[in-house]
Amino acid sequence: MDSDERLALAEELVTQLKAGNEAESSSIISKLSDCIESELFVEVGRLTRELHEAINEFLIDPRINEMAQVDIPDASERLSYVITMTEKSANTTLGAVEAGLPLADDLGEKARDISAKWEQFCNRELSVDDFRVLSKELANFLALTTERSKQLHSHMTDVLMAQDFQDLTGQIIRQVITLVHDVEDKLVQLVRISGSKLPEKQKDAHKLEGPIIPGIDQGNTVSGQDDVDDLLSSLGF
Amino acid sequence: MNKNMKILVVDDFSTMRRIIKNLLRDLGFTNTHEADDGNTALPMLQSGNYDFLVTDWNMPGMTGIDLLKAVRADANLVKLPVLMVTAESKREQIIEAAQAGVNGYVVKPFTAVTLEEKINKIFERVGG
């Protein structure tokens, strides 16, 4: 029904109403509203079909299934493996350091001992017998230094080798980042289909955020130890 | 400062406990013990005559802040010096810890110098 027809009906309605013809008036009103309703039904039908098609298209996207059934469980496994590897590396490094420190301390102590006696010798304060003892100690010390430096070298190599986690975990984490991007794309698509607006994100002040990560809004955080100290001193610490 | 003081280090990650214990040993403190969360730590503190508590915040079981509150609520532990060493760095949290009665707050990642500084400061204040 075009606007000329509607105008004609409206004028006819006014005429009938003025004339007091109740039955005629009602029939014209229902003709007018029928035409509006039928347009509305057509529009709702079109939207429903479009939504249905969009959802179907989304559901038959094989990537979604693959992500849900394979990639995401895989990603959890991969990330757990990252924890395992970094923990192993930290323990190897700590073990090497804990084994190496006493060796270095031992060498330092013995060297301090010998230097005291060496100084006496340089000042000609050492008897011949004492010198014999000192030269024996020196020979032992040199042998010990050779041995200890070999041990320290081996511990340092362990520390060196324990850093290989960085390369491997880096590769794994990069794969997971790619997956997160894919999932994000699909979620955005889903939100677009449903046409809903996301509610404003609420930050929970009591949720533990963990380490500060550059580039991520974690709420009202300090930027380092100096900031913590300033904040505490402003509280009277 | 008494270098023989008995120290409890509480963190759910064993590597972090090892790092802190090593740093403490470098500072001359060798009487160190470990717990992996507040639930394990609290009974140790209650029966173990500890002189100093170093604790993380985010741990499964009982968190560091709950441990701190439990310590302050216990008449025998109310004066125990507590240092928090944690990655939690929101201002609200630092204020919460201060209000709960923490003696020092170190954010991870931290350095050996920072740890030493905070420990010295705590015992200067406690001693003086």
Image: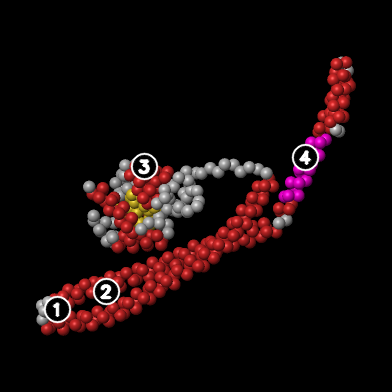
The nearer-to-camera label among 3 and 1 is 1
Instruction: Answer with mark 2 or mark 1, whichever residue precedes in sequence.
Output: 2
Name the residue at the top extreme.
Answer: A19
Q: Calculate the distance from the C-alpha at mark 2 to the C-alpha at mark 4.
A: 87 Å
The amino acid sitting under disc 2 is: Leu
- Residue at 60%, 59% in the rendered image: A179
What is the chain letter for disc 2? A
Q: Calculate the distance from the C-alpha at mark 1 to the C-alpha at mark 4.
A: 106 Å
- Mark 4: give few (<14), some (14-19) or many (20+) Cα within 10 Å: few
Q: Are discs 1 and 4 located on one and the same chain?
A: yes
Residue bearing the label numbered 2: A107
Which of these two is toward me, B98 or B59?
Answer: B98
Query: From the image, which quarter does the C terminus of chain A lie in?
Result: top left
The nearer-to-camera label among 4 and 3 is 4
The label shown at residue A121 is 1
Residue bearing the label numbered 4: A44
Q: Calculate the distance from the C-alpha at mark 3 to the C-alpha at mark 2.
A: 48 Å
Tell me which secondary structure the magenta stretch mostly adopts.
Answer: helix
The magenta stretch is A38-55
- Mark 3: give few (<14), some (14-19) or many (20+) Cα within 10 Å: few
Secondary structure under the numbered disc 3 in the rendered image: helix
The amino acid sitting under disc 4 is: Val
Residue bearing the label numbered 3: B99
Secondary structure under the numbered disc 4 in the rendered image: helix
- Residue at 55%, 64% in the rendered image: A172
Residue A181 place in picture, x, y as percent: 60, 56
Above or below residue A41? Residue A97 is: below
Q: Calculate the distance from the C-alpha at mark 2 to the C-alpha at mark 1.
A: 21 Å
Among the 4 quarters of the image, the one containing residue B110: bottom left
Q: Are discs 2 and 4 located on one and the same chain?
A: yes
